[in-house]
Image: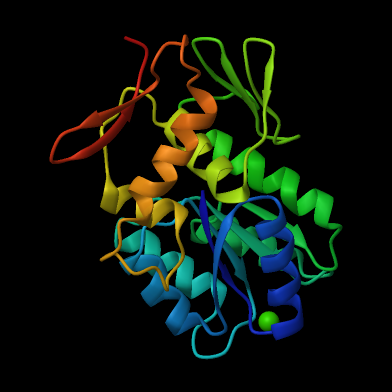
Amino acid sequence: MRILVVEDEKKVARFIQQGLEEEHYTVDVAHDGETGLHMAASENYDLLILDVMLPKKSGLDLIREFRAGKGVAPALMLTAKSATEDKVAGLDSGADDYLTKPFAFAELLARVRSLLRRSSKEKSTVLTIADLELDTVSHKAKRASRIIELTAKEYSLLEYFLRNRDRVLSRTIIAEHIWDYNFDTGTNIIDVYVNHLRNKIEGAAEMRLIHTVRGVGYVMKEE
Ligand code: CA
């Protein structure tokens, strides 16, 4: 899942980015509201994390304009501790939740998971298909009783497939949700990763779960 963080305090932005990347999210960062709005509107984010006080355009204006442009990604506002009006204004502007600074990273993560669950068909923290299970809190994957070790990217890819099961996903869509702003779409890296993931989750005697859709991309489904 891919997240945009718009935060002008670079240390805070880096702290949030590193923490989220450790949890296997793909993260892009913008340091002002104008750049943030441009990125939010032109890319395909699963979640926005927006500071309220930003140069060039406030987080409130950003989310208001994003929603006016039919942007649907859920948004978490970061507000100053004392400013109750910020919270109200944030929710009224189209944000879905808020967190007051300073915050514990564990709380940020819990809110991120909660917002991603809300926008996903799958409401459980454990995603499943057939006898495959992925725990989105502990990041553990298993097939029947077999524990599967995944790299961060493989985890992200599997989570995205599971959240979109039965849906045909083009390579472009996969790239937009798993790889960051600097991804070079000309490479075959997605096919390489899908094959790595297949080798791990589909044993020789096990049911295929990731199916190639010729000329289009991939679909995760039970046959
Ligand atoms: Ca700020």
Indicate the quadrant containing the C terminus: top left, top right, bottom left or bottom right: top left
Looking at the image, the residue that sits furthest to the left is 215
Q: Position of residue 185 (x, y in %)?
A: 29, 64
Left-right relation of 126 to 217: right
Query: Where, by quadrant of the figure, is residue 176 drawn?
Result: bottom left
Residue at the spot x=67%, y=67% of the render? Answer: 17
Looking at the image, the residue that sits furthest to the bottom is 56
Q: Nearer the viewer, residue 28 or 133?
A: 133
Ligand 1's image quarter is bottom right
Identify whether 217 is placed above or below 89.
above
Residue 120 visible in the current orientation: no
Q: Position of residue 118 (x, y in %)?
A: 54, 35
Left-right relation of 198 to 59: left
Identify whether 160 is placed above or below 200.
below
Query: Where, by quadrant of the figure, is residue 95 drawn?
Result: bottom right
Q: Nearer the viewer, residue 99 or 8?
A: 8
Q: Position of residue 50 (x, y in %)?
A: 59, 68
Q: Nearer the viewer, residue 149 or 11?
A: 149
Identify whether 119 is placed above or below 165.
below
Q: Position of residue 19 (x, y in %)?
A: 74, 61
